[in-house]
Image (cartoon, grey):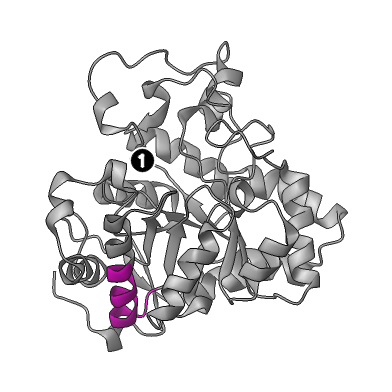
Amino acid sequence: MPRLTRDEMRGRAQTVRGLVDPAVLGSTLMHEHLIWDLRPPPLRSGDQGEEPGLANHWGMTTSMAGSPANLHQPSAEVAIEAVAEAVAAGCETIVELTIGGISPDPEGLLRVSDATGCHIVMGCGHYVEEYQFPENHHRSVDDFAAEMVAQVQEGLWGTAVRAGLIGEIGCQNPWTPLERRVLEAALIAQQETGAALTIHPGRRQDQPQEVMEFIAARGGDPSRTIMDHIDRTIMDDDALFRLADTGVVLEWDLFGQESCLYPHNWDVDMPNDAGRLRAIRKVLDRGHRGQVVIAHDICHRSHMTRWGGWGYAHIHRNVLPLMRRRGFSEAEIREILVETPRRLLTFA
């Protein structure tokens, strides 16, 4: 495939099927996984534990009795079934953020898009250090940046499918030097391509703020940067408002996870969907319009309806009616699901 130029990309969005007019994207889930492998590399061989099902659904969804099998969804056919449910409920675009280290499948996602009619936008780059390829430890910032630019302009992981944004770039607590190099490279790639950048922050309340200070020091654009997983990271209004004041887009992307149990960080009580909406309401009332997007971040098979979970249609089927009952206007809903995603997915 020929390399796209910045001028060819500017003002357009890029799905797995190619460049499109951003107006066609419609209602968008900004952070999902359709085909993925989140098993830590040492667990990718040997005993894979229990298969997810109704009898163990509670344990699987709260990670209290999880298994490697629950963290791996390699089937395009399963993804087609799941995405078709979301399309039937009103979803038109899904941003798929399975990137380096967690088994991205660009051609599988192209099959899903062709079969369902859903626009799928892929991310690019690398996840947290635990999942990165061993050779990444020896790579430079410029090398990572050139790779990400090529993933947007030429193709991903040896295919002709191109990325439509950068990330979810993996950061964690403590933030490692390798992860900092990858994020610095992502900022260079963002400047060269005009793509938006989406970030997986570490599980510490002030880590998103630390990341934004890092970005500001390198001339990054907060308005084209998305901070993921707000709902499992920031529990304090002051910290939330301080982060919003940077201009970053805030992503509540764990809709459907209704349990307060969060074994990755026992110090927090995870909000349910009503709690997520209360936090979003506070941010909007404070004047941060155009700074909110939402999703489910489905990354366990037990999250999918086939295995008893809420699935990719949950926001459109259940959360939107709840938003209307909670006083969200149609303009606010459209901004969150259509207008802000469209702005972010349009190359600058």
In the rendered view, does 17 fall on the left or right side of 23? left
Image coordinates for residue 249, horizontal then vertical, percent: 57, 69
Report the front residue among 152 and 84: 152
Report the front residue among 260 and 255: 260
Mark 1 neighbour density, 10 Å: few (under 14) some (14–19) many (20 or more) = many
> What range of the chain is rendered magenta?
184-195
Say what secondary structure mark 1 lies in. loop
By secondary structure, the bulk of the magenta-drawn segment is best described as helix
Image coordinates for residue 6, horizontal then vertical, percent: 27, 85
Image coordinates for residue 254, horizontal then vertical, percent: 59, 45
Q: If the image is split into quadrants, where does the C terminus sit?
A: bottom left
Q: Of the residues shown, which amino acid type is indicated by label 1?
A: Ile
Q: If the image is split into quadrants, where does the N terminus sit?
A: bottom left
Figure disc tally: 1
* Rendered residue at 16%/65% (across/down): 140
* Residue 287 on the magenta span: no
Report the front residue among 333 and 223: 223
In the rendered view, does 150 fall on the left or right side of 80? left
Q: Is residue 256 above or below residue 225?
A: above
Image coordinates for residue 217, horizontal then vertical, percent: 41, 79
Quickly name the residue at label 1: 35
